[in-house]
Amino acid sequence: MSHLRSTHCQHYKNHKLMTQLFKRLALFSFFALMISLICWITLGSHSNNYPTSAWLLIALVPLLFPLRGLLHGKPYTHAWTSFLMLFYFSHGIGEVYSAQSFDIYPYLEILFSFITFSTSITFIKLNAKMRKSSQIK
């Protein structure tokens, strides 16, 4: 019986570590997306043609809404953040497709939005498994 409990405890610890890892990866890629968007808007080649402040508002305000829930590791916030990332992913794809020359920023937007999407989904799944296994004691 004690062997079964120690196995269950170890399994729970592994799930908790993996859940924390994916939460941190989601946060890292989320903030990397924010930083790359700021750099793209302020330093990009198009920055002289458009009002920078308006583009910063358009690009960053939607990312501010889920910030508190992501920092607190709320699964519901991770779920709708993954849907929000689809917008940034499709925007990056459109920018890559329509670009006249190579620019690193759309590729970074695609990369970081994809990583945020996939790690948020994985966090949700692992968090659900962890909660389920903690209730089965």
Image (cartoon, grey):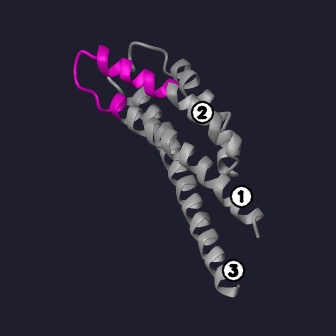
The C terminus: image quadrant: bottom right
Q: Residue 129: in sight, yes or no?
A: yes
Residue 7, horizontal then vertical, whole percent:
61, 78
Predominant SS along the magenta part: helix
- In percent of the image, x 36 and y 28: which residue is there? 106
- In percent of the image, x 68 and y 33: which residue is there? 65
Question: In the rendered picture of this protein, how many numbered marks are placed on residues?
Answer: 3
Mark 3 closeness class: few <14, some 14–19, many ≥20 residues within 10 Å? few
- Of callouts 2 and 1, the N-terminal one: 2
Within the magenta stretch, is there residue 94? yes
Which amino acid does the dot numbered 1 rest on? Lys
Q: Nearer the viewer, mark 3 or mark 2?
A: 3
User: Answer yes or no: do the residues labelled 3 and 1 have beta carbons within 8 Å?
Assistant: no
- In percent of the image, x 43 and y 28: which residue is there? 42
- Residue 63's disc is 2
- Residue 132's disc is 1
Q: Nearer the viewer, mark 2 or mark 1?
A: 1
